[in-house]
């Protein structure tokens, strides 16, 4: 199960849009948890759950600030993924918290500095293949790097 949907709305300290922060929590953090819970009856031993988070949700990696709603909601998503990894281990279900890389998509305005969706997916699929009950709960970059919380 891949929880991939997400939104990015820029919220700065100067323009602290609380409604936008709330919406980003709803879509980026709460919805993936609700969907995972709703679809649990369809998951069995050996199933895998992916939370598509972002490096922007790494507290340690945050050196540029801003993006309040996005960053805060992705931290919350990562925490949901970590708790799920603990709670679902006994059922044989592994959970990964994945960063796709900086990817040329609508979200990033198809940035020239990003990798293509195909390059990103190749790495993501390798991480999903690698995911098991020993490394469940890991926060990975699609390139295989383990990211700091
Ligand atoms: N691109 C990057 O560099 C990057 C970096 C880090 C993390 N990510 C994460 O990767 C994931 C995919 O991002 P992307 O770059 O592919 O973004 P995107 O091009 O903006 O696509 C976002 C996707 O999420 C869906 N979505 C948004 N809100 C939704 C809602 N309320 N209900 C159902 N679907 C909804 C959209 O569906 P519609 O088209 O129907 O609106 C769309 O398919 C996101 O979780 C994002 O945070 C992306």
Image (cartoon, rainbow, N blue to C red):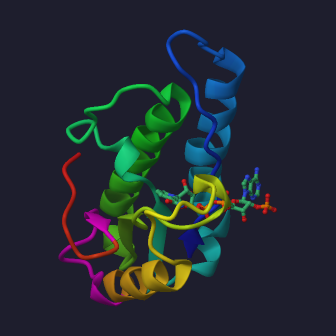
**In this view, 115 is above or below 13:** below
**In this view, 113 is above or below 33:** below
**Going 63% across and 55% down the picture, which residue do you hit?**
109
Residue 61 is situated, as x and y percent measured from the top left of the image, at 23, 42
Magenta span includes 57: no
Q: In screen coordinates, is 85 left or right of 10?
A: left
Ligand 1 falls in which quarter? bottom right
* Snapshot quadrant of residue 72: top left
Q: List the single residue furthest toward the top.
A: 14
Foreground: 23 or 122?
122
Magenta span includes 131: yes
Q: Which residues are magenta?
A: 129-141
**In this view, 46 is above or below 2:** below
**Going 30% across and 81% down the picture, which residue do you hit?**
131
Residue 118 is situated, as x and y percent measured from the top left of the image, at 52, 85
**Going 19% across and 50% down the picture, which residue do you hit?**
148
**Count of numbered circles on the image:** 0
Residue 70 is situated, as x and y percent measured from the top left of the image, at 52, 37
* Snapshot quadrant of residue 8: top right
Foreground: 37 or 95?
95
| Secondary structure, magenta segment, majority class | loop
- Give the quarter of the figure containing the N terminus: bottom right
* Residue 134 visible to the viewer: yes
- Give the quarter of the figure containing the C terminus: top left
* Residue 45 visible to the viewer: no
**Going 20% across and 38% down the picture, which residue do you hit?**
60
Residue 122 is situated, as x and y percent measured from the top left of the image, at 42, 88
């Amino acid at each position: 199960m891949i929880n991939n949907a997400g939104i990015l709305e820029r919220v700065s300290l100067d323009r602290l849009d609380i409604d936008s922060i709330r919406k980003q929590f709803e879509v980026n953090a709460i919805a993936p948890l609700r969907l995972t819970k709703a679809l649990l009856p369809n998951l069995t031993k050996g199933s895998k759950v992916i939370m598509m988070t972002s490096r922007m949700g790494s507290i340690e990696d945050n050196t540029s600030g801003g993006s309040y709603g996005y960053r805060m909601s992705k931290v919350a998503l990562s925490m949901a993924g970590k708790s799920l990894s603990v709670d679902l281990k006994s059922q044989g279900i592994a959970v990964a918290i994945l960063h796709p890389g900086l990817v040329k998509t609508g979200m990033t305005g198809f940035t020239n500095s990003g990798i293509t969706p195909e390059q990103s997916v190749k790495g993501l699929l390798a991480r999903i293949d690698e995911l098991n009950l020993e490394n469940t709960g890991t926060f990975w970059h699609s390139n295989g790097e383990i990211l700091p919380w």
